[in-house]
Amino acid sequence: MGCGTSVATETQGKIVDTDDTVKTSNPALTLKSAVLIQRWYRRYMARLEMRRRYTWNIFQSIEYAGEQDQLQLSSFFSFMLDNFTQLNGSGPDLISQLLDPVVDPWLDRETCYNLIQIPESYAGPRLSFPLSVSDTNALLNAFKEQQTLHARYVLQLLYETKKLLKQMPNVIHLSTSYAKEITICGDLHGRLDDLLLIFYKNGLPSAETSYVFNGDFVDRGKKSIEVVVLLFAYLLLYPDYMHLNRGNHEDHIMNLRYGFTKEVMQKYKVQAHVFILLFLCSEAQSDLLSLWDCGCLQTHGREILQLFQDVFSLLPVATVIDGKILIVHGGISDQTDLDFLSTIERHKVKSALRFPRHSLEQLDISQSCRRMKRLRSTDSSRPSSSHSYSKGQRTPNQRKRRCRPSRQDSAASTSSSSSSSSSSSSLCSPRTPSCLTPRQCPASPSMPYAINVLQVPFLDSASSVPLPEPQQNECEWKQIVDILWSDPKTQEGCSPNTFRGGGCYFGPDVTQRLLLQHGLQLLIRSHECKQEGYELCHGGQVITIFSASNYYEEGSNRGAYIKVGRELVPRFYQYQVSRTTRKLTLTQRVRAAEGSALRALKEKLFTHRSELMSGFEQYDHNNTGSVSVSEWALVLETVLRLDLPWRTLRPHLARLAPDGSVEYHSCFEDMVPGNPLTQVTPNLAETLFRYRTDIEIIFNIIDKDHSGLISIEEFRHTWRLFSAHLGVDIDDRAIDDLARSIDFNKDGSIDFTEFLEAFRVVHKLDSKDQHLNGKTDREKYS
């Protein structure tokens, strides 16, 4: 102890000496040091915030670009489905199965689940209907333990949910006099951990704890089935205290691209070849056969998906609390009318991406085709002359369609001819694909006036049809599209939501007008990921709430929910589900998210390589391999159409030459193709890289049994649809050669999953990082 005391005394003496030295230091020098440290810290934090913001912009721009691609593909399929049958004489079954699914009447009867037997070996939760608290608790515990609910119970749950939702109105009216507080949650997107954390922090749904979940329960996350099953279970248990709004992802066409369809088919499907393998390897073959015969091992994924489609279309589209707070998933437009919205038959809108059907009788396709043939034959040898519109012919501006409720149709003639600032149905709806664009046909002696027609690409030809007149079902569809897809903006007015491709942007004046019209004081919506989980805009009259934390990347954003009491003052609660984020510093979190965003952006560059190179070469007149920074940024903005700060991002994407210009070839150095087939030409390979997701969607439509295999003929059909959608010319011989080359065992079937896997972008830096990390670990433990 003596030694210990001696050391302590010596140390104390040193500390005292040091303190004396500090006391005698120059105060001016100390203050100057503090100012320098403060400046450095502020600059450091500013740079960190700048990185965080452009990382966010990258994630959001790429997400919305994907939604635009989905809307274009869906609009192409919709038009093909409406018109292909009557032009070609036989319907496109592959498209109709997706866009106009006919629900089996068997699914509307209790036999849809009663005939399914549950084997004794099933260890998951067993439900009894009507549901009780013990059933929902069993579901919660089972999902925490990674168990899967049996298909029979899923079908029965959906069947009961469908019966309940049929009795509900389009707009739900709630009162805080019955529930002291109402909790409002935003997008969950298949994040089961977020849902469980909300229940843990705020309490399970009950008569004392009322919830409104504002859409987008599924897609993107890996636990969409578990999330939506739990929400439906609590809806059945507490229909007066659990409320669900429809989101834009409660849509079977969106589910095809963003994962829910695939998740259902994977969790509720036993493929035939797996059963055969089990049969050959098992000694209890008779037991396996009996299980197969009773349906225990057969697929129920398709039946489950069909019921989900029906249930999603029956979800209410809005909720009103105390007549003062409106809750919708996306937003509003200058044409949103809650009274009209309440009268819509919402179940008819199976998909907001499925445009209202126009029959060819309405379009007068046969007469138009004959007229166009005469036009081409008569005018092939002489130029067209320009003529003015006849008195009875409507101009393009006059063709802008209105979507007011029917009681206002009498005023249409007074307003349709004027150029209004309000958004029309054609502007605020998901845009028509580029290959389905209105064009003005030239006048000719046989046609003494110009007409507006729609150029329609088909699998074997192109035809022109006159644009249809608006119908009542279009107005209803438009109302739902705006509710599910719109976003707020800071500028006044209402304009097309070109960033997403669907819905509209609505300004503070649009919000103010709707709130005053219906005696409301607040609009709560979701639909957009926010870094803090929520955001206020339009002078606090619009609140965005988002409940899926870590949406883009680990640590990218918080989740949040709102609680509203009788005083109708919103209170915000934030959280973040993560096992690792808490251990990371702010700099480490920003760096991880930034790296993920830049990798996604570099993939985007790689898939548009030929277009970008062509644009760069137009400015590189001397073939130096470099262009100015402004020219480089202009080409990227023109080709990619992403609203990003390209000059700020330049150090992460390309090198500078000694003279300060950008070496544009360096944009693609970090990216290499996966393992593309040698038989694929470079142009076709780039097309595959760029439109890989679209091709996969078309393939999934053709692969009705989701086996992962399609015939060579179906493969050719995929490419014919794909080339028609993009308006690109893909040589049939090249496709045939490609089909034969990937039919490895020559059995006439193609494993499309392996084929697509060959056309993905590989990051060079990823493999380098893995190598360096492995080397560091070896040095650490050697």
Image: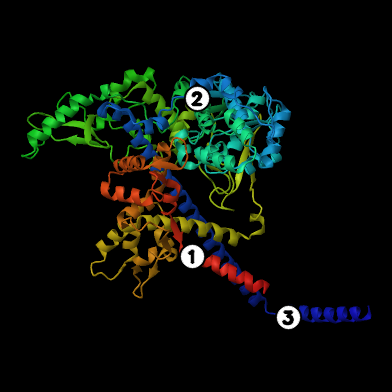
Counting residues from the start of the chain, the first of labels 1 and 3 encountered is 3
Instruction: Report the number of numbered marks.
Output: 3
Q: Is residue 110 above or below residue 100?
A: above
Query: Badge 3: how crowded within 10 Å, few (<14), some, or many (20+)?
Result: few
Q: Nearer the viewer, residue 232 or 14?
A: 232
Q: Secondary structure at mark 1?
A: helix
Using the image, tell me which numbered label, if any, was put on residue 644: none
Residue in the image at 44% along x and 31% along y: 351
Q: Which residue is mark 3?
A: 24
Q: Whole-Å distance between the Cαs marked 2 and 1?
A: 56 Å
Q: Which residue is mark 1?
A: 765
Q: Nearer the viewer, residue 740 or 240?
A: 740
Answer yes or no: do the residues labelled 2 and 1 have beta carbons within 8 Å? no
Q: Position of residue 600 (x, y in %)?
A: 46, 55
Q: Is residue 202 left or right of residue 645?
A: right
Q: Quadrant of residue 190?
A: top right
Q: Position of residue 511 (x, y in %)?
A: 47, 33
Q: Amino acid at mark 1?
A: Leu
Q: Is residue 232 left or right of residue 90?
A: right
Asked if residue 491 can be seen in this view, the reply is no
Asked if residue 363 can be seen in this view, the reply is yes
Answer yes or no: do the residues labelled 1 and 3 have beta carbons within 8 Å? no
Q: Which residue is mark 2?
A: 518
